[in-house]
Image (cartoon, coloured by chain):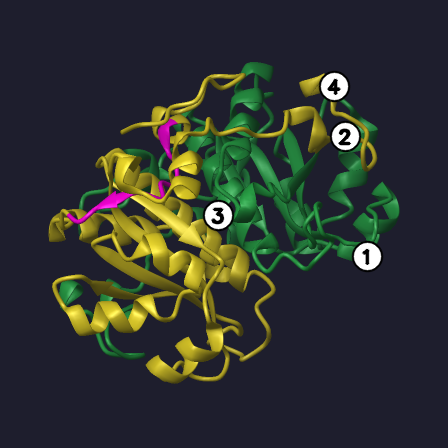
Chain colours: A green, B yellow
Amino acid sequence: MSNEVDTDHPVLEIIASRWSPYSFDGRPVPDEDMLSIFEAARWAPSSYNEQPWHYIIAGKENKEEFETMLLCLVEANQLWAKNAPVLALGITRLSFIRNDKPNRAAIHDLGLASMNLVLEATARGIAVHQMIGIEPGRIRNVYNVPEGFEPVTGLAIGYAASPDRMPEALRERDLTRRTRRPLKEFIFSGKWGQVSGLVK
Amino acid sequence: MSNEVDTDHPVLEIIASRWSPYSFDGRPVPDEDMLSIFEAARWAPSSYNEQPWHYIIAGKENKEEFETMLLCLVEANQLWAKNAPVLALGITRLSFIRNDKPNRAAIHDLGLASMNLVLEATARGIAVHQMIGIEPGRIRNVYNVPEGFEPVTGLAIGYAASPDRMPEALRERDLTRRTRRPLKEFIFSGKWGQVSGLVK
């Protein structure tokens, strides 16, 4: 199952073929792949090299840990994420370690790390479907996340499966071609809303 | 000038070799590379496929536009970013288009798009140095950024140069080996702070 798009301008294959499936098969992800996936996150850039990102992971081989994490997702996500072999939560530190001042880049930089993670996974034939639909309060309680750290995302990690056995609504999502708005809608020059000459 | 690190686990070369130079030479970036760089951002994933990211770009060939954007960075960044051939600002939409509700992923997803952008650039031998040190209020005024959109980052885009002609403090930064904390400091399982068996 792959879902490569025709881009308007050439980009790396891992960028064009990356997608977020709703259908996962249960095949476990080898440890060496998992390690490289998180190593990729590790080398993302961050404001003042703060590296505010943290991940809690739960593999299906530990049923209790997996179920506990599954319940930290909103119900609509539990429906399909339960099929992935690995779940993770993306949590960021909101202040700088060295001076305790707010880090305006904290959430942004978690995004940088997670994109590295996703692309490393893609290169290994592994799909990652990120979710904003999580239960931050429950996560905070269940995992004892300290004040000053914010649970932001959930991640389902595994191998994309044929969507045949999915409920129809989700199956359709996996079979629908991915779309994006054109560059001229978000690349500006000179002032807001003025399409950049580059993309005209 | 390259700066590839020895990673603890194998990752894509573009991830290991990506870095944020302070030294840029003035060589312009070809339009076809610029287009592919932003095309890469375009195909990032986002919550509900909202694509909240927007970029304003200014190339040095338009001196006035470039100077205007340079003044939207904090002074410490102006010092070195002035040497890059292209500047950009990363701005995100804080609410969903379809229902005007707050998008909790708005800033995170700008990070996803920008990481795609940076890796596509890296694959083309182009460096991107992102900055959180910008002047959001000035950007809002100068570019007429509407309410509900937040300027988050600046980006200097171009070719890394030899740091020889940089002021000493910045030269040292470019010559210092990049470091990251080990995986066991931010990959947990079961509860906060408990190192995951994967990375022990």
Q: Please, is residue A69 above or below residue B5 in the view? A: below
Read off the residue under disc 2: B189
Per the model, the C-alpha gap separating discs 2 and 3 is 31 Å
Read off the residue under disc 4: B197
Per the model, the C-alpha gap separating discs 4 and 2 is 7 Å
Residues marked 4 and 1 touching at CB (< 8 Å): no
Task: Say few, some or many: other residues with alpha carbon within 10 Å of mark 3 (under 14 / 14 to 19 / 20 or more).
Answer: some
Residue A91 position within the rendered picture, expressed as x and y whole percent measured from the top left: 68, 46
Question: Disc 1 vs disc 3: which is toward the camera?
Answer: 1
Chain ID, mark 3:
A
Task: Say few, some or many: other residues with alpha carbon within 10 Å of mark 4 (under 14 / 14 to 19 / 20 or more).
Answer: few
Chain ID, mark 4:
B
Q: Please, is residue A10 above or below residue B174 in the view? A: below
Read off the residue under disc 1: A137
Chain ID, mark 2:
B
Residue drawn at 31 percent across, 61 percent down? B88
Q: Tell me, for residue A171, which label it has, or none.
A: 3
Extent of the magenta region: B17-26
Residues marked 4 and 2 touching at CB (< 8 Å): yes
Question: Disc 2 vs disc 3: which is toward the camera?
Answer: 2
Three-letter amino acid code at disc 3? Arg
Q: Is residue B20 magenta?
A: yes
